[in-house]
Image (spheres, grey):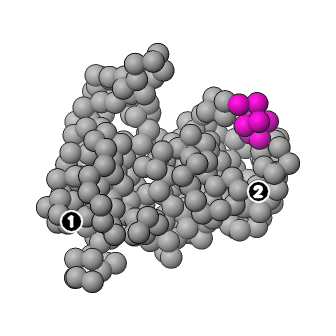
Amino acid sequence: MSVSETPEFLKRFAIKTATAGGQATLRWFRQAVVVHNKEADGSFDPVTAADRACERLIRSRIRAQYPNHAIRGEEFGDEGLHEWTWIVDPIDGTRAFMSGFLHWGVLLGLLRNGEPYLGVMVQPFTGEIFVGDGSSATYLRHGESRTLSTRKSAVLADALFATTDPRLFATLHDQSLLQRIEARVRLTRYGCDCYQYALVALGELDLVVENQLKPWDILPLVPIVRGAGGVVTNWQGLADLTSGEAIAAANPILHEQVLATISNS
């Protein structure tokens, strides 16, 4: 392994690169940004100049430092095949971004042989950075640095739960599943996109359950939540997230209770 592929070097590079990408978005935030729809079938999948500028910048920095590494991004697709693959979501939460809300972030993840190895989430407007490697996770803001740790609440009835949009639970089965979870938790919040996973790592939320996720929506967040002590699996309790279904629970005990709730839905 070269010096530039040591864990600490990779982490520093990822933080600097995601932070630079985040700064590039701010010229458009709360500036009446023009929004384009990527879909032609009547559905709405927004993209802005900020999304594209951020991903271009991140890709250029990765290519300059790691020309052989693969890159997979939301806006500009896949390039290359390698042991190391960078996953880019330039703005996770474009709907929030275009509406002036703060529940969005720049996601940059690194896979090694297809497995989540490192993840960074940057919220450039608030100056927050969440970084994790699956074993530990750190919160950075304006010179402050502290270790992230999830909540230890082990009772689903006490849990604070979030999911981005209940309309994504489109089938009768999935609607029933969501209703069962909401009936068992203390509080449900909507509309937080990537920020809700960061809040699990921060110890503010207990649980996120989602579906219809793309790889760039979830894979950069996995090392952060796991590094803070949380559990991230699919709805069957397995590590494979290719189905687009995900559970992020603050601890293993709570995770088991969620799996039991899902299996009975």
- Image: magenta residue range: 171-179
Residue 24: image location, x then y, percent: 22, 44
Residue ID at (32%, 23%): 35
- Residue 141 on the magenta span: no
- Judged by its main secondary structure, the magenta piece is helix
Toward the left, the furthest residue is 64
For discs 1 and 2, the disc positioned in front in the rendered view? 1
In the rendered structure, are the residues bearing label 1 and label 2 in contact, judged by CB atoms less than 8 Å apart? no
Q: Which mark is residue 113?
A: none
Residue 70 figure quarter: bottom left
Residue 125: image location, x then y, percent: 34, 45
Toward the top, the furthest residue is 42
Residue 175: image location, x then y, percent: 74, 33
Q: Is residue 101 left or right of residue 209?
A: left
Dot 1 amino acid type: Asn
Q: In which quarter of the image is the C terminus?
A: top right
Up-down relation of residue 159 to residue 118 (above or below): above
- Residue 178 on the magenta span: yes
Tell me the SS state at disc 1: loop
Toward the right, the furthest residue is 264
Dot 2 amino acid type: Leu
Q: Mark 1 points at which residue?
A: 68
Return the disc, 1 or 2, that comes first in the chain's sequence. 1
Q: Is residue 44 left or right of residue 190?
A: left
Residue ID at (51%, 55%): 198
Q: Which mark is residue 259?
A: 2
Tell me the SS state at disc 2: helix
Toward the front, the furthest residue is 81
Up-down relation of residue 34 to residue 92 (above or below): above
Residue ID at (77%, 44%): 181
Q: Can residue 61 be seen in this view?
A: yes
Up-down relation of residue 257 to residue 176 (above or below): below
